[in-house]
Amino acid sequence: MGDSSLRFVRDGYLFGTRGFRAAGSDRFRTRLLGRPVLVMRGADSARFFYEGGRFSRAGAMPRSVLKVLQDVGSVQSLEGDAHRRRKELFIGLLSGPSGEALVDRFREELRRAVADSGGAEVVMLDLFHDVLTRAVTAWAGLPESVSADLRRSGVLAQMVEAAGMVGPGNWAVRWRRSAAERMLAETVVQERATPAAPDGSALAVVAAYTEPDESGRSGSAEEAPLPPEVAAVELLNLLRPTVAIGRYLTFAALALHRHPGWRDDLAAGDDIGVRWFAQEVRRFYPFFPVIGGRATRDLEWQGERVRTGDWVLLDLYGTTHDPAIWEQPDRFLPQRFDGLIVEPNTLIPQGGGGMHADHRCPGEPVTIDLLEEGIRMLTRELQYEVPEQDLRVSLRTFPARPESGFVVKGLRETQRAAA
Ligand code: HEM
């Protein structure tokens, strides 16, 4: 079996799709970076991969990706009861009134950024990253000096960019990430000594959170707070992916530009259309190409044998473009969601399975809410012109983006919104 690493680089997001076509199947085996791997797509594969704790994330992603996106002791590295318990911490912070508060912050910060832009030319991807950084650090209850540091370094947006890099670019961001982790760990220590963060904020909740102490130091029955460096990793797991939503917002702006009929309908108040549009942005535009896992036990599934430790890749992009699930998958058609009951293992840009028991993204509901809010604001409250620029989205570059970052001119509130 030949090694497909070069083809992975060459085909990018289409690596899986081309492999499935060549194999005439939703699964194929190959080697990547010298290791044998089973690549799969589709709703059944997503169910198999995500549900029932069959695959762990340990050793399943290249170090260059892991080091900037996840880290030691994070919720993603846990399994079983320990995972379920920690997961509730995220779900609690990201849903209900706490999730709504994040959307409110975003709206305020976007309005402020538009006013501050003074109608100058802006790159929307950068603007959204900045707005989301301001919104999420304030929402999290971080001290202003810490928020300012994170804004200045730009590390929250850079971590996602760097996941697609190897070598010096990646190392520089890892270094900045380590500095941010140290700063956040110190912030947690201070918060524990002298609580200052608003009640219910991410900093207050993460700092006060306890779990059964499995270190053996105090016996298994006792609860212990997270070690400060793990608390810092989990704070980053709230901050970084929220800023990453800037990519979806930029893709939404691009889609509105490409589909002026939809722009007009949504501007006129079509609220259900806003939901379909947001879902189609998440389905259609590329974000995470694949997720890797290693089998936690020997498995037999649809004639496929997977042994403990075997490496499997679930093709997220390939599943959101799987012709067996989606009609005309390569066309942007928000109306496909009209009357559609979305099966949880089909629309999986943020992972499959269930949010509580499996590794499905706990930020999915708030991502949808933020995206809908952004779409409403772009169509109903804001005006801008879109000059000539390179708006192509390469499927070879991870993470994907419109080449220009989506430049607009004369960004301002509409007269109605200003009134
Ligand atoms: C741009 C939007 C987002 C995308 C594309 C995305 C994507 C994903 C994916 C694919 C997974 C599954 C990983 C796996 O199977 O191992 C995941 C998990 C996760 N996401 Fe998101 N995410 C987004 C937004 C968010 C937000 C807003 C938050 C928090 C504020 C968040 C926090 C997490 C966490 C903590 C996990 C690990 C969950 C676990 O292991 O149980 N994500 N995300």
Image (cartoon, grey):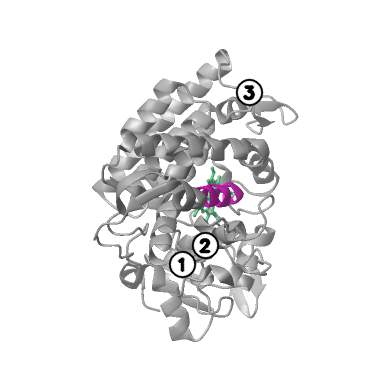
Q: Is mark 3 within 8 Å of ligand 1?
A: no
Instruction: State the image quarter where residue 327 is shown.
Output: bottom right
Asked if residue 367 is among those painted magenta in the image, a careful observer would answer yes
Measure how far apart labels 2 and 1 are at the Cα level: 6 Å
Measure how far apart labels 1 and 3 are at the Cα level: 44 Å
Q: Which residues are magenta?
A: 362-374
Residue at the image position 34 percent from the left and 37 percent from the top: 154
Where does label 3 land, which residue?
A: 199
Where does label 1 land, which residue?
A: 261
Disc 1 element: helix
Labels 1 and 3 touching (C-beta < 8 A): no
Residue 359 x/y as whole percent: 60, 53
Query: Outermost residue, top direction?
Result: 194
Residue at the image position 53 percent from the left and 65 percent from the top: 310
Asked if residue 363 is among those painted magenta in the image, a careful observer would answer yes
Of the image marks 1 and 3, the number of the one nearer the N terminus: 3
- The three-letter amino acid code for the residue at tag 3 is Asp
Between circles 2 and 3, the one closer to the viewer is: 2
Image height check: is 22 above or below 226?
A: below
Q: Is residue 84 left or right of residue 317?
A: right
Main secondary structure type of the part rendered in magenta: helix
* Residue 306 in view here: no
- The three-letter amino acid code for the residue at tag 2 is Asp
In front: 290, or 273? 273
Residue 20 x/y as whole percent: 47, 80
Where does label 2 land, which residue?
A: 265
Residue 349 x/y as whole percent: 52, 60
Residue 185 x/y as whole percent: 48, 26
Measure how far apart labels 2 and 3 are at the Cα level: 40 Å
Labels 2 and 1 touching (C-beta < 8 A): yes
* Residue 92 in view here: yes
